[in-house]
Image: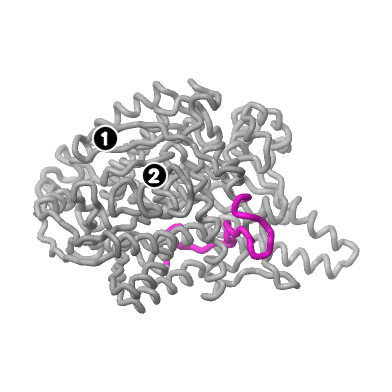
Amino acid sequence: MANFETVEVSTDLLIVGAGFAACGVATEAAYWAKKNGLKVTMVDKAATDRSGAVAMGLSAINQYVGVRDGENTCEDYVRYVRQDLMGISREDLVYNIARHVDSTVHLFEKWGLKIWTDEEGKYVHEGRWQLMINGESYKIIIAEAAKNALADAGGELIERVFVVDPLMDGNKCVGAIGFSTREEKLYVFKAKATVITAGGAVHVFRPRSVGEGFGRSWYPPFNTGTSAYFTLKAGAEMTCQEVRFIPVRFKDAYGPVGAWFLLFKSRAVSAVGGEYMAVRKEELNNWAPYGLAKPIPANLRNYLGMLDVDAGLGPLYMETSEAINKIADEYKEDPKGYKKKMKELEAEAWEDFLDMTISQAHLWAAMNVKPEEKHSEIAACEPYFIGSHSGASGAWVSGPEDMDTPYKWGYANMCTVDGLFAAGDASGASSHKFSSGSHAEGRIVGKAAIKYIVEKGAEPNVDAAQVDALKAKILAPLDRYQEFCKVTTEPSVNPNYLLWRQFMDRLQKIMDEYAGGVTAAFKTSKALLERAMELFVYLREDSEKLAAEDIYSLERIWENVQRMWQGEAHVRTMLFREETRWPGYYFRSDTPKMDEDNWHCFANCKWDPATGEWEMMKRDVWNIPGV
C-alpha cells in the first residue's frame, strides 16, 4: 500500500466543507463551543477564502425576506418556495431559514459587504427577494468571519484535505477519513458530531462546454457530489434526488440572467422574435395550479423556451439592447443625462459578470458583444445537483425543535444517522436558500450540533479495522498504477486499469444519453432509465479498477466516484417517481403529465451499508397550517 503518513485529528465538532453553509456552521458553533469548552474543526479540500459556489463572487444576495421593514413575511417565503418547487418542499425547513436569514444578511453588512442602498438608505432590490451587492469579495468577507470565530474559540482550520468517507459506529457517524491534496498524508478525523456541508455536484452530466471549454460550467466544477456520497455511504435517508436544476444562462460562458430579467426587465425571445413566455402561455394550463400562479416556477419558464427550441425556433436570445435602451429612453430629452445613464447601464451590465462570472465578460469581449447594441444568446445548461438553489436534492433532515412538524426525530438538521448533520446543498427539499440562506442554515446547524454534543455527545468509538480498510481502499488506485503502468508503452492505454478522465467520460455518457441530459433534450423514460441502471453495474465494476499516477489524479478519482453515487441516486429516484412534475428540469416521455393524486409526495431513497441494497420510499408533504 502507498506509504502515506496517517494524521489523527480528534475534535468535538467536525465540519466538512468551507463554503457558505460551512462558514455559517463555523461562525455559530465556535461561539457556543467556546462557552462549553469544546473544539470545532473545519476541513476542506480547497482554501476557505475561495471555496464553494460563491468562490468567484456574486452580484446579488438572493434571499432577503425584509421582515424588519415590513416588506414580506416568512410565510410569504414559504409560499414562494412551495410554488416554485411545484408543491414539493419541506416547509418547516424553509420557514426556519426564512426567519433567520435577515439577521445573517445584517451580519454580512457588519462584516464589510457593500449592499446597495438608495437615496433614502434603503436596500436596492434586484427582485422581491434579491438585494444588489458589490460582491466580488463576498466569499472572502464571510470566510474571514468564520476563520476569526474559529481562532477566537481555539478551533482548527485544515485546508487542502479531501474528505472521502464517513467513519461509522453502527448508525452513528463518528468522524471522517480523507487525504491531503498536497502531501502524502492520510487524515483520520474523530468527532462527537459531524456536519456535512460539502456542496452539490456538477459534471455528473456531460456539460455543454466540451473540448477546449471543458471545466467551464455554471456551478463550480470542484463541487463533485461529496455531500451526497458522504450521507449515502453513512446510510442516511435522502430526498428529492430527482430534482436536479437546469438554469438558463448566457450561452457558453454561463453568465447570469437574473439581473437582466429582474433589474433590467429584459425579454427572452426565440430566433424569430417571439417572447416564449407570452406565445406559449396556454401551455401553463397543463401544469395547474402551479403554472397559473405567480411567480411561474423556474422549471416551467425553462420548459416554454425548450418548446420553442424543439419547434425549430432556436436559438433563444436575451434582448439586452432593447432593455438598456428602454430604460435610457426616459432621459432622451436630456442629451447629457441620456449619455450618463447609458454609461451607467453599460457599466452595470458588465459589472454583473465581473462580480461573479468573469468568463462571460471574457466571451463578450472576445466576440465584440456590446449589450446596448445587440441581443445575446441564452441556453439551458446541463443538469446540476444543488439543493440550495432551485434544485432540491439532499439529505432528509430533522425539522426545527420549536415547530409542530411531522419531520422531527432529533436535533435541527440532523440526518437519519445519529451525530450527522447537513446544511446548504447537503440538506434536501429546502430550496431557494442561496448564499445567505445557506449561511443562515449553517448557523442553525452549528448551534444544534453543539447542543447535541453537550447533551448526548459521547467519545467517538472508531473501529481501527474500519479505518485500515478505508485506507487501503482510498489509496488502492496509487498502488494499481505502480503495479501495472509499465505493462504498456502508453500508460493511458492499459488492460489492467482506467484513468479518472476515462471513467468520468463513461459516467457522463450514461447520464447524458439515458438520464435526460443536453443531447437528449432533457427527456428520459422508464426504458432509458432501466438501461442506465444496467450500465451502472459495469460502471461500478470499472470504479474498482481506477488507477492514479499521483495525488492529483487520486483526488480526481474519488471526486468521480462520488459523482457516480450522486448519478445513481438520481437515476433510481427518477425511475421511482412515475410522473413528470418538473418539465424544464427533466421530462419523462412515458409519463408526460403531473400526477397529483399519486405523486404529490417526496420521493426518498436510502442505501444500506450493511447489505448494499437500495430502498425507495414515499414521504408525505406537510403544509404549515394556514400558509
Mark 1 surroundings within 10 Å by alpha-carbon count, few (fewer than 14), some (14 through 19), many (20 or more) = some
Q: Is residue 536 covered in magenta?
A: no
What is the secondary structure assignment of the residue under circle 2? loop
Please name the residue shown 17% across and 63% down the image: 184
- In which quadrant of the rendered view does residue 19 lie? bottom left
Task: Tell me the kind of residue under disc 2.
Answer: Trp
Please name the residue shown 51% across and 67% down the image: 138
Q: What's the CA distance linking mark 1 and mark 2?
A: 27 Å
- The answer to whether residue 82 is left or right of residue 406 is right
Pinpoint residue 369: horizontal percent, then vertical percent: 65, 55
Q: Quadrant of the C terminus?
A: top right
Mark 2 surroundings within 10 Å by alpha-carbon count, few (fewer than 14), some (14 through 19), many (20 or more) = many
Tell me, yes or no, if residue 513 can be seen here: no
- The answer to whether residue 91 is left or right of residue 542 is right
Q: How is the image coloured?
A: one colour
Pinpoint residue 595: horizontal percent, then vertical percent: 53, 25
Q: Is residue 61 covered in magenta?
A: yes
Label number found at residue 396? 2
Please name the residue shown 29% across and 58% down the image: 194
Please determine whether, in this image, residue 378 is positioned above or below residue 117: above
Q: Which residue is mark 1?
A: 539
What is the secondary structure assignment of the residue under circle 1? helix
Please determine whether, in this image, residue 381 is positioned above or below residue 550: above
Q: Quadrant of the N terminus?
A: bottom left
- The magenta-colored residue range is 50-76
Label number found at residue 61? none
User: Front-most of 531 and 337?
Assistant: 531
| Farthest residue, direction bottom | 152
Task: Tell me the kind of residue under disc 1.
Answer: Leu
Please determine whether, in this image, residue 107 is positioned above or below residue 514: below
